[in-house]
Image (spheres, helix red, strand yellow):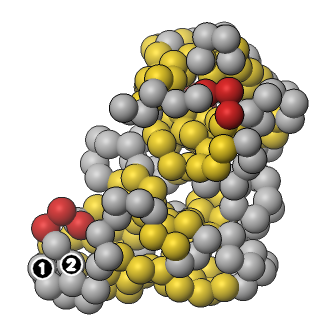
């Protein structure tokens, strides 16, 4: 079945870096734009970034622009986010989510992973 | 950035009740509005796209309406599995933004 599975979360000190991965299966990964969405403990959902299906375009939330970089390796069916200069306010569950339309972008999220927790704390 | 608001922030309802949640955008977003359901400790689930189109596999008791700035999610007859938090999300432009959520719990 179609699924995406995040990994790479953990506890990291402020100012340090972390890279999250999202492995996709059961879908033609290279045909879909992919997103990262996060949720701080007890809070609502916050969109983080999107990358086009072919990697040609990337967009970020203002809160992470210049610190986070989204990327993908279509040969490995894997999405990444490199998170630098981490802050306490980046503490959240990070979800990988598939854009709902093939070979396009609808900016809607139809498949979600289970999430990976990132805690930024000294 | 487009701000999304939802009302109410929470509501208590009984099984079988008709429930309506409102979402408002800070500017016109046409029909670029999606709805998600999230249960505690779980990932969100995609319910409705383009304001009123039901995602495959979603029960028909869920419906959406609206355009421009004002939208609604309606559950025609609340079922035990529908107790959850519901989020609207605009897909008009980036940065994509969500409403703060509406928690539906048991009366």
For the point 40% across and 70% down, the residue is: B102
Spatial CA distance of label 1 from label 2 is 5 Å
Q: Is A109 displayed left or right of B61 in the figure?
A: right
- Subunit of mark 2? B
SS under mark 1? loop
Residue identifier under label 1? B15
Residue identifier under label 2? B78
For the point 47% across and 23% down, the residue is: A25
How many C-alpha atoms fall within 10 Å of the one at disc 2: few (<14), some, or many (≥20)? many
Q: Is residue B5 above or below residue A94?
A: below
How many C-alpha atoms fall within 10 Å of the one at disc 1: few (<14), some, or many (≥20)? some
How far across and down, in percent of the image, does residue A36 sit? Answer: 61, 35
Q: Which mark is residue A111?
A: none
- Subunit of mark 1? B
- The quarter of the picture where residue A1 lies is top left
How far across and down, in percent of the image, does residue B101 sit? Answer: 46, 65
First along the sequence among labels 1 and 2: 1
Query: So how many labels did they put on this image?
Result: 2
Image quadrant where one finds the C terminus of chain B: bottom left
Q: Nearer the viewer, residue B102 or B62?
A: B62
Q: Do residues under tags 1 and 2 come within 8 Å of each other at their CB atoms?
A: yes
């Amino acid at each position: 079945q179609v699924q995406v599975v995040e990994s790479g979360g953990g506890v990291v000190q402020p100012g340090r870096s972390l890279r999250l991965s999202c492995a996709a299966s059961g879908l033609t990964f290279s045909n879909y734009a992919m997103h990262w969405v996060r949720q701080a403990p007890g809070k609502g959902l916050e969109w983080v970034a999107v990358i086009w299906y072919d990697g040609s375009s990337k967009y970020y939330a203002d809160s992470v622009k210049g610190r986070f970089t989204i990327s993908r390796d279509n040969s490995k069916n894997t999405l990444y986010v490199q998170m630098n200069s981490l802050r306490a306010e980046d503490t959240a569950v990070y979800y990988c989510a598939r854009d709902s339309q093939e070979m396009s972008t609808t900016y809607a999220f139809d498949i979600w992973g289970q999430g990976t927790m990132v805690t930024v704390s000294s | 950035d487009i701000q999304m608001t939802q009302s109410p922030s929470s509501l208590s309802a009984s099984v079988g009740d008709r429930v309506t949640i409102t979402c408002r955008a800070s500017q016109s977003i046409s029909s670029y509005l999606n709805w998600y359901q999230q249960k505690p400790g779980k990932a969100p689930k995609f319910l409705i796209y383009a304001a009123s189109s039901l995602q495959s596999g979603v029960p028909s008791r869920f419906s959406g309406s609206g355009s421009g700035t004002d939208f609604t999610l309606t559950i025609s007859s609340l079922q035990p599995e529908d107790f959850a938090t519901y989020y609207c999300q605009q897909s008009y432009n980036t940065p994509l933004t969500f409403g703060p959520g509406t928690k539906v719990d048991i009366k």
